[in-house]
Image (cartoon, rainbow, N blue to C red):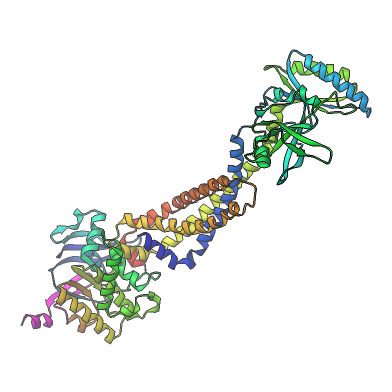
Amino acid sequence: MITLSNIEKVYQTKTIETVALQNVNLHIPKGEFVSVMGPSGCGKSTLLNIMGLLDEPTSGLVEIDGTPISKYKDKELAHIRNQKLGFVFQSYHLINDLSVLDNVELPLLYRRGASAAETRKLAMTALEKVGLSARTKHFPAQLSGGQRQRVAIARALIGQPEVILADEPTGNLDSVMGEEIMNILLHLNQQDGTTIVMVTHDENMAHKTERLIRFFDGQQVSDARTAAFNFQQV
Amino acid sequence: MIRHLFKLIWNRKKSNFLLITEIFFCFLVLFGVLSFIVYNVRNYTKPLGFEHDNVWLLTMRPSTDSSALNHQNLEQVLQLVRTFPEVQQASLTSSNAPFAFSQMNNNLSYGNVKDVMADFYEVEDDFKEVMQLQVREGRWFGMQDNASHHAPIVINKALKQQLFGEEDALGKLIPVNDSTNYQVVGITEHFRAGSEFAADEPAFFTRLNLPRSPNSFWSEVLIRVKPGTGIAFEEKMVKQVAGIGKGWALEVTTLEKMRQNKAKLTMIPMIALGLVCAFLILNVALGLFGVLWYNINSRHGEIGLRRALGAASGQIYRQFIGEVLVLATFGLLLGVMFAVQLPLLQVFDVESIVYTVAILGAVVVIYLLTIVCAFYPSRQAAAIHPAIALHED
Ligand SMILES: Nc1ncnc2c1ncn2[C@@H]1O[C@H](COP(=O)(O)OP(=O)(O)OP(=O)(O)O)[C@@H](O)[C@H]1O
Ligand SMILES: [Mg+2]
């Protein structure tokens, strides 16, 4: 699905040069639920941005379904993001001036041939999945943090992407809420076969996924199957 | 997408309020100025109804109060003027000669139509030839009017329309007072003598009969000279006229000069308003640009998000241009709602087409203005890298 080879990412500002990622080699196969852990500033969000085609590595190769992304033009990258990828961001990134329903519908706005009625129906279904069908007319400011994150997840779901990239989806939530979000993601992975890459600070969450990659200072330090994977295998 | 934009703008109506108000007021001012300009330009393109080239105006101010003597001298002056080979025709006129800074008007009523305000011109039979008027119906004044029972008048098309509508006007009597009536003997085309920018207002001519008006004096003569007649003849004529009217103050000017003076009266405010308007537009443009620039820059997070969700950079660009157009549309809708009151309530006596053109013109200018102002900020927005945009939030 996604393959990274020899990825290096250097942020260049006037005074300092930050190496955010270094010598990263990863392959995420279809249908896998991967968690990424590491201390703050070790490059997790940067990694997700590169996987999500939002950013380009300074050097190295990014392949989506076997095709290097350097082959694509901006328009084609946008198309891939729209069709194949779903994002859940660290800080939700909802548009405050749009209702919950409108926020969830956004990805389909950029998809050709999606009729308004169809879009509405899909948005309702997505909101049902995250248990928010009673809040469709609300605005993000009227929701709790957990509810906002669920809206963001519904938005990531609506386009039925092959991959969901989630950056600390439970980071700002209490454990009960975090649990709920985690269950939604697990469900997606198991029922729909959605590939998920999730950044997390929570060991418990990470151990519910199949594979755990640890980062330190821009480098992969470990990449291993979890107990959950072994459990699933048995 | 359009629906999405309307929703977005509508939900942001509070923060967009100022921008919409700015566009609204800009529209109103533009509409006012354009109405004024369109009105004048439209009048300008209509025929004047007369030919002013090679027409001179001789003005005479007698030095004595003896009206009998003055009248006698005036008859001699006219006789003299008409004998010059350079002169084709000459006609006395009331002081409101074409392009003069003088006006005379009168209320006319006919049947149910009451008090139509019309300019009136007291002129001699030769006036038609001097000014080369076109008589479309009936006839101009002539010797046969000497015997007529009623005071003959020739009216212009505009007056005919207002007084008689579709009815035949020729021969109709218009009461002046208890003992006299005007009788319509002819109808001319346009007669817009005030200025080239004057509207096509109702006007009529009464017959000035010098021999029949003893002790009366008219101080202005319109003279049609042969093409190419110049200053030498003017001097010769003035000298000979001065020989008749001893001590008279004489002045000769051309209608062309008077036309230019009169045109300035409209052109200057039109240009001034145009300049003020241009400055206003420049100001609004700068303001608009600033606000858009700020708005778009404070929405980097949103831009990044949209890019992440699959918007191509061109779509971001079109979104922001689209938003500005929607904003402009809100402002313009408000503005047009106000503007259409003018023709609907007929606040001024101006044809609706003038307002229609002004509204359309102002709408087009404002749309162009907003597109131009939104162009650069939107380009910038579209160029923002999605990762950076998301990072900034
Ligand atoms: N746009 C940028 N410009 C400069 N430096 C950046 C930029 N984005 C990230 N960095 C730097 O790159 C490094 C990795 O950042 P990143 O956001 O990937 O960390 P992270 O692992 O997601 O941290 P956290 O757990 O706190 O979210 C950090 O040192 C950060 O300062
Ligand atoms: Mg991060």
Q: Residue furthest left?
A: A234
Q: Answer with left or right where residue A193 lies relative to residue B241.
A: left
Can residue A191 be seen at all in this image of the molecule? Answer: yes
Q: Answer with left or right where residue B330 lies relative to residue B79.
A: left
Residue B319 x %, y %: 37, 58
Total marks placed: 0
Can residue A155 be seen at all in this image of the molecule? Answer: no
Residue B298 x %, y %: 42, 64
Based on the displayed image, in which of its 4 quarters is residue B128 positioned? top right
Picture residue at 42% right of the left edge, 60% below the top:
B296
Picture residue at 30% right of the left edge, 85% below the top:
A174
Q: Answer with left or right where residue B101 lies relative to residue A172.
A: right
- In the rendered image, residue A165 lying in the magenta stretch gets the answer no
Q: From which residue to which does the magenta span run?
A: A208-234
Based on the displayed image, in which of its 4 quarters is residue B135 positioned? top right
Q: Answer with left or right where residue B60 lies relative to residue B297.
A: right
Picture residue at 39% right of the left edge, 57% below the top:
B320
Location of residue B273 with respect to B302 vertically, above or below: above
Residue B297 x %, y %: 41, 61
- In the rendered image, residue A224 lying in the magenta stretch gets the answer yes
Q: Nearer the viewer, residue A135 or B219?
A: B219
Picture residue at 30% right of the left edge, 82% below the top:
A173
